[in-house]
Image (cartoon, grey):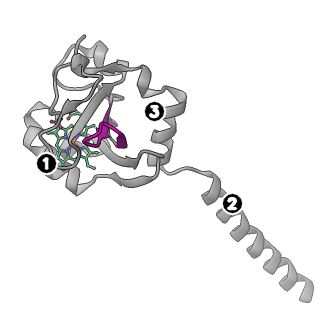
Amino acid sequence: MKRLLLFSVLVFIGGITATLLFAAISDSPAEKLWKRITVETPYSHWHHLDNHLSGKKSGTPYAPYYRIYVNNISNKSGKMLADFGTIFVRENLSAEKILQGLTVMYKIEGYNSEAGDWFWAKYSAEGQVEEAGKVKECLGCHSFAADSDYIFDHNLQR
Ligand code: HEC
């Protein structure tokens, strides 16, 4: 009986350890997306909109200047609506044009069909996830562009 108890305790502890380990090594969707846009397919090699690499003045209150990049999936589509797999990266720059962080839109089939299927994420310049998912703040403003697939800056050079 004692042995059985010891065995059960060991299995229990083992289970907890495995769960904790798994949680530690498996990245959240936002962390995976960060790796994708910085390591696997770095956005700095993507197409940038409107040839404004020096940083364009923003109409939004949350960053005085910005640069927008889009992955090649969108470039191929030639359509107004972005294809699934499209990723927009917006570099948010200070008044001195120093990178403050990234805001990202990633179109995933079936993720949020009521609002364009976009996954929203906000990162610090170092890649810390600040917000991610169906972020109300992002949607609240980008909903003004709902007719153009929640995208404001449509100047894609194909
Ligand atoms: C107050 C309004 C506002 C909020 C809030 C906002 N955005 Fe934007 N966003 C804009 C505007 C306007 C643009 C177009 C560029 C510009 O003028 O700054 C833009 C551009 C973008 C782009 C480039 C693609 C496009 O639509 O042109 C991405 C990516 C983006 N925003 C992500 C986000 C994310 C992620 C959040 C939430 C963390 C967010 N935005 C919150 C207004 C907003």
Give the left or right position of residue 81, taking residue 36 as reference.
Answer: left
Mark 3 = which residue? 37
Q: Are marks 1 and 3 in contact (CB under 8 Å)?
A: no
Quadrant including the C terminus: top left
Label 3 residue SS: helix
Ligand 1 image-quadrant field: top left
Provide the secondary structure element on which disc 1 rests: helix
Residue 157 is inside the magenta segment? no
Q: Is mark 3 within 8 Å of ligand 1?
A: no
Q: Residue at x 8, y 34 (%)?
A: 147
Residue 59, picture quadrant:
top left
Q: Which residues are magenta?
A: 88-101
Amino acid at dot 2: Leu
Pointer 2: what residue?
21
Label 2 sits on a secondary structure element that is: helix
Question: Residue at position x 72%, y 67% from top?
Answer: 17
Q: Residue at x 50, y 51 (%)?
A: 28
Q: CA distance from mark 3 to mark 2?
A: 25 Å
Q: Are marks 3 and 2 in contact (CB under 8 Å)?
A: no
The residue that mark 1 highlights is: 141
Dot 1 beta carbon under 8 Å from ligand 1: yes
- Which amino acid type corresponds to the residue marked 1 in the rendered image? Cys
Would residue 1 be seen by someone viewing this image from the given angle? no
Position above or below: 60 against 15: above
| Position in image of residue 6 (x %, y %) | 86, 82
Q: Is the residue marked by circle 2 packed among few (<14), some (14-19), or many (20+) residues within 10 Å?
A: few
Q: CA distance from mark 1 to mark 3?
A: 24 Å
Residue 143 in the image, given as x and y percentages of width and height: 12, 45
Mark sitting on residue 76: none
Q: Nearer the viewer, residue 96 or 29?
A: 96
